[in-house]
Image: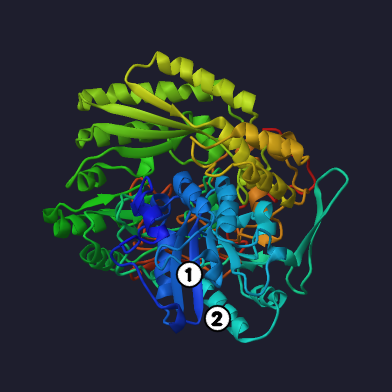
Amino acid sequence: MQLPVLERLILGAQKPSRYAGGELNAVHKRFDRVALKWGLAFPDTYEVGMSNVGFRLLYHALNERPDVACERFFMPWPDMESALRAERLPLFSIESRAPASAFDVLGFTLQFELCYTTVLAMLELGGVPLFSRERRRDDPLVLGGGPCAYNPEPVADFFDAFVVGEGEEAIHEISDVVAEWKRSCAGREDLLWHLAEIPGVYVPSLFRPRYGADGTIEAIEPLKPGYETVVRRIVPDLNLVPQAEKPIVPFMQAVHDRLPLEIQRGCTRGCRFCQVGMITRPTRQRDPNQVRRIAEVGLEATGYEEVGFLSLSAGDYSCINGVLEDFFDEFGPENVGISLPSLRTETMNARLAEQIARVRKSGFTVAPEAATERMRRVINKGNAEKDLLHAVDTIFEAGWELVKFYFMIGLPTERDEDVRAIVQLCAEALRRGKKLQPRAEINVGVSTFCPKPFTPFQWFGQNTLAELQRKIGLLRDDARRSKGVQFKWHDAKASIVEGLMSRGDRRVGAVIEHVWRNGGVFQEWNEHFDYDLWMRAAEACGVSIDWYVYRHRSFDEVLPWDHISAGLHKDFLWQDWRDALNERGLEDCRWTPCYDCGACTGYGLEHIVASATPPAGGSQGTGQDLTHGGDVPVRLLARRPGQGPDRPPAERKVAAATP
């Protein structure tokens, strides 16, 4: 019997398991028995998308509703895309292989700016009109979410709406509004108007930017009364975020092939380069009893042999040692491992290393980010060289053979000696490691810094490509003389394109469209990234890289994302930028008086920690019990403005400071 065309294409693809579906714990529903059909789209390959914990969480949350069917979409690899086009078949969902145009809502996870052209490719391949203004009543509602939604202006014309912030609650409110609208006879404009009334939902067509003669934004005018600012959505307590009891188990190996378990959300370390640390404040830690229960249920339902304890810094989870000890006591005999994807050097101690080493020893990753004390003060990375070297000693002494370091170049105020110190520090770490572990190896990844919205560095003019390449040359020359340390460099050209979109406005959308129409898809992949194509597109569209990427901003300039609120006062971010230029650090506000950044005090939120005492070596504070023995989880109440330290007010009428 001859197979249907799509089945034959899947079997003939380079990796059929990317498209086959039918995985363990996948959800299948009949469309004629639900009121709303959601398509969750990830603009990358299956194995990348299935490693995204937020994407997976929303899939199961939507499918828990009996009135909603949610299915998944991923971008086909070029071989499969070509095959679909040759047969004139559309982009299809993994579960039912229905075309994208058959869904009521298409929700895209926007994790990286370089995926924007892939979004356009998926819309076109799915038969969905490219621009929001071209869509009619029967076309899917195209939503965006994720970190890029904090400045979605470069892709504003392609999306109907965005969810700014955390979407676990917003997706249900959106579902209710869309389902009610479907039952009415109202037009698409009416739907967008009602979506704008949901907290955290940004509808770009209800705002109009006005530009000045110098190219800057004069104003961003709201077109709906009372809709001047879109405030991020946030879940106040991580314990309220449901974890899927039966997560999907992919047929093929995903990038992160393990049971994902989010133990902490938000970070108050205040690293000035880190957007996700700023926009996810305050810190919310999951109850350790819930962590254990989720792990038990998830392992039984999936058969995974490893659990990933996910957070921005797992060592900051205030009872990490106790949780690991309990976990390994129960699951160690079954050879179930733990992955801590992110650890700060100053949180590493012998007990933590011993706990992690109880099952298996793979590579250990730490991220010093900068190699000199001065640069670490600038970026507010609250660690010292002694912390890094102590961490390396502890890791190798516990039996590891490989340590991976991550650094950045192109940071504000950076000097040549800061760049060259990366090689010197790594060589010293390896020298010490060899004394404890003869087979010790150190691998180093060096990326180029790109400023992001809602960070203190959002006003910084990015290093030019020529300057970044010169700094990489310094590193390469020194690395040749440092035997035993393996270096890898991030493509500086990709950072320039990323910078164009991370702080761009709606005029950048023409560049994105131009690149896509000229074959620029999968730009987040090294083998497909085409810098020259981006530069030609920018020139053709009249978009200046110098102006968008390399230019310093002033406090008074209207930024493309000023009508969106991440909960952070602009005054606070500006003062933190000034502190960076003056090489002043800022302590972790979980264990100090409130700085009134706005993330807590403006919303009546609280830090929620799983232990009343800061983790040893990782608090940047005193280690005292700040809550007088409160229950677990402990809530550290947000202080009101004026209760924080005496910090000078932000300077409003100043030109951009020179890094």
Please tell me which residue is depicted at 59% across the width and 80% down the height of the picture: 177
Is residue 51 among the parts visible in the rendering? Answer: no
Residue 340 against residue 37 in the figure, above or below: above
Label 2 vs label 1: CA separation?
14 Å
Amino acid identity at mark 1: Glu
- In the image as oriented, which residue stretches furthest toward the front? 1
Which quarter of the rendered picture does the C terminus lie within? top right
Residue 228 against residue 335 in the figure, above or below: below
Amino acid identity at mark 2: Asp
Is residue 200 among the parts visible in the rendering? Answer: yes
Residue 439 against residue 51 in the figure, above or below: above
Question: Where residue 352 appears, x then y in whole percent?
Answer: 26, 46
Residue 487 against residue 618 in the figure, above or below: above
- Closer to the camera in the image, 355 or 602: 355
Please tell me which residue is depicted at 66% across the width and 39% down the height of the picture: 460
**Earlier sequence position, callout 2 versus callout 1:** 1
In the drawing, does residue 391 fall left or right of residue 591? Answer: left
- Closer to the camera in the image, 38 or 323: 38
Question: Where residue 133 appears, x then y in whole percent?
Answer: 72, 64
- Closer to the camera in the image, 246 or 22: 22
Q: Which residue is mark 2?
A: 176
Q: Residues within 10 Å of mark 1 (few under 14, many from 20)?
A: some
Colour logic: rainbow
Q: Which residue is mark 1?
A: 168
- In the image as oriented, which residue stretches furthest toward the bottom? 184
